[in-house]
Structures are given as C-alpha cells and as structure tokens.
C-alpha cells in the first residue's frame, strides 16, 4: 500500500512551553510492518492514541539494535536517525486494528544520535529510578518526547554548522554584524526551510557516495574542497519526493541532466538503463564498465526500490 502525500500547510512556530511533547517512532530494518519511513509509518492500534497526539507535529525515528526476523544478524545503530512530520492517520484496509501514519518533511540526520552518551540519556523516559535503562519503556515502539529533548536530539543530529548555515537571515540582518545565536531560532523553524533541507540532502548524498558519480565513477574536487558530483533526487521534490538519502544519488552534471530528462534510469538490480534514442555512443563510454551504478557502502543508504520504480515509470523514456 502507498499513501499519497497530503497538501502541506505552513508549520506554525512552536512556542517554548514545558508541556509540549512530540514523539519517537521506532523503525528497524526488516520490520514486519509495512513501513516506508519517508512516506508512511505502519503501527498497531496499541499506539493509536500516541500517534494521534503527534499529528501535525514532528517526530524522530529511532533505530534499535536488532533488525527484523529477516535480519537476525543485523546490528542497528541504537540511535535517532531522522526527523519527520506526521500529517494524518488512516486505517489499514488489509489488517484490522492496524493504521498508517502519513509522513511528510522527512529528513535524515547526517550524524545519527546515540540514545545514551557518557551515561546520560537523551530521553528521560528511558531511565528507571535507580538510573538503569527501563526495558519496558525501551520496548515501546511509539513514545512521547518532550519538546526540549526533541530539539536537543535534532540539534545533535544536524550539527551547529548545518543549522546555522541553513538558517534564513533575520529581517534587516547585515553580513558584517554578528549573526543571531542558534538558540534564538527554534530548530523546528528550519526543518521545512528549503535552503536548509537542500544543504542537508546534498551533504548526506555526497557523503554516502564518497563524492563520486554513481554512473561514471568520476570524482572531481576543486581546490576549495567542493565536489563536482551533484546530489540528485530520484523522485523530485516537485513530485513529493523526500529529502532522503534513499531518494538520492550522486551524479556528475551531465549525467544529472540526462537522469532528470529520462535518458537514463536504474533497474531493480541497479544496472544502468539507457533510452533507445537521445544518448550518443560517446556518452555511454563514460559509464562504469559493468553498467551498474556505484552503491554506498551502507545498504541502508542504497536507493529505495519504490523511488527507483517511480523514476522508471514516470520519467524514463526507455
């Protein structure tokens, strides 16, 4: 099942109030649930109330240590790995007492945030009175997250350099003056800002692909450290494509142009597809000899089949 994205509304600024809470959604590799974290979160009725309270607000995704039944040997990062906004809840037509949370504004953290560092927990909900980890609390797939803890996790996940660089300038701000302090701008105010999201997406994709074009293996970095390989969306933002590494691929400028115009695409086995016309023979010699794209070292960052299928069906001219 696939949920269509709902029309987005401008997200209201959140005022600093002690009683405000967001939520943590747990998602693991090989989950038995029909999750696509960039677009939907599948959950049983047990968590309906907690998810309903998160509608219209942001959440963080947490990746536990163990994967699903098909990935028993997989060791998760035990970290918060992304943030997103819940926009709706819909019943699962196939499974009684199950629901889907429709997701928008998904964006992964360049720096996954451990749930515990130096003996300190990111969520006070996870700590027992004796200071040990509460296994019962940890076992809950959806749990409330106070506003202050949410902002601390997000700030750690993106890092001050991205948060400050991606922040829109204050009205009347002049470049020679000292810029506004980070704490004066609520973190959530930046999460739907296009400049900020483009910076995070570009950094995440270029890092995942080692600043190398996935089609050509070409890596060029100028004297200032800027890479020639561009971060391309597989399903574009204009078509409700998320700013997820799994919806991105690093491409040189020319290949990016061909990809966006449907002259090339990617098969389910990651082999390179070329349109029947429009691509000169000389251009084909740029591609990797095995005619398969370079993939990130981490399988969690590989292009997701759903986004590749969308590109083949909606863009590719093969």
Image (cartoon, grey):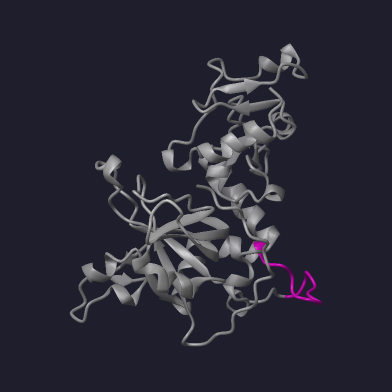
Going by the image, does 257 lie left or right of 285? right
The answer to whether residue 131 is magenta is no
Q: Which residue lies furthest to the bottom in this view?
A: 18
Asked if the magenta segment contains residue 167, the reply would be yes
- Of 182 and 37, the residue lying toward us: 37
Question: On the image, which quarter does residue 81 sit in?
Answer: bottom left
Magenta range is: 166-177
- Decide: is 226 above or below 147: above
Residue 20 point in image, percent of width and height = 49, 82
In terms of depth relative to the viewer, which is nearer, 213 or 126? Answer: 126
Residue 121 percent across, percent down from the top left:
32, 71
Tell me, yes or no, if residue 112 can be seen here.
Answer: no
Q: Quadrant of residue 144?
A: bottom left
The overriding secondary structure of the stretch rendered in magenta is loop
State the residue at coordinates (65%, 40%).
232
Q: Position of residue 169 (x, y in %)?
A: 74, 70
Residue 269 lies, with reference to residue 176, above or below; the image says above
């Amino acid at each position: 099942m696939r949920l269509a994205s709902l029309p987005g509304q401008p997200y209201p600024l959140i005022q600093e109030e002690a009683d405000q809470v967001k939520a943590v959604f747990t998602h693991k590799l090989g989950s038995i649930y029909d999750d696509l974290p960039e677009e939907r979160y599948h959950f049983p009725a047990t968590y309906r109330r907690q998810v309903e309270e998160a509608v219209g607000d942001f959440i963080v995704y947490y990746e536990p240590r163990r994967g699903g039944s098909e990935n028993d040997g997989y060791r998760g990062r035990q970290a918060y790995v992304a943030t997103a906004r819940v926009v709706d809840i819909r019943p699962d037509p196939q499974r009684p007492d199950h629901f889907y949370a429709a997701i928008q504004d998904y964006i992964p953290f360049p720096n996954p945030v451990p749930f515990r560092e130096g003996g300190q927990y990111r969520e006070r909900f996870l700590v027992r009175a004796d200071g040990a980890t509460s296994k019962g609390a940890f076992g809950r797939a959806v749990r409330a997250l106070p506003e202050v803890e949410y902002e601390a996790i997000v700030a750690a996940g993106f890092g001050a350099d991205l948060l400050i660089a991606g922040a829109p300038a204050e009205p009347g701000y002049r470049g020679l003056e000292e810029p506004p302090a980070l704490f004066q701008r609520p973190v959530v105010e930046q999460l739907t800002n296009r400049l900020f999201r483009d910076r995070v997406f570009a950094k995440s994709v270029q890092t995942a692909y080692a600043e190398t074009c996935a089609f050509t293996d070409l890596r060029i970095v100028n004297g200032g450290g800027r890479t020639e390989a561009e971060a391309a969306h597989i399903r574009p933002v204009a078509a409700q494509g998320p700013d997820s590494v799994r919806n991105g691929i690093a491409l040189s400028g020319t290949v990016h142009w061909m990809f966006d115009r449907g002259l090339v695409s990617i098969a389910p086995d990651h082999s390179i597809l070329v349109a029947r016309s429009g691509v000169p023979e000389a251009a084909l010699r740029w591609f990797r000899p095995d005619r398969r794209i370079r993939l990130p070292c981490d399988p969690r960052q590989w292009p997701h089949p759903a986004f590749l299928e969308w590109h083949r069906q909606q863009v590719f001219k093969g």
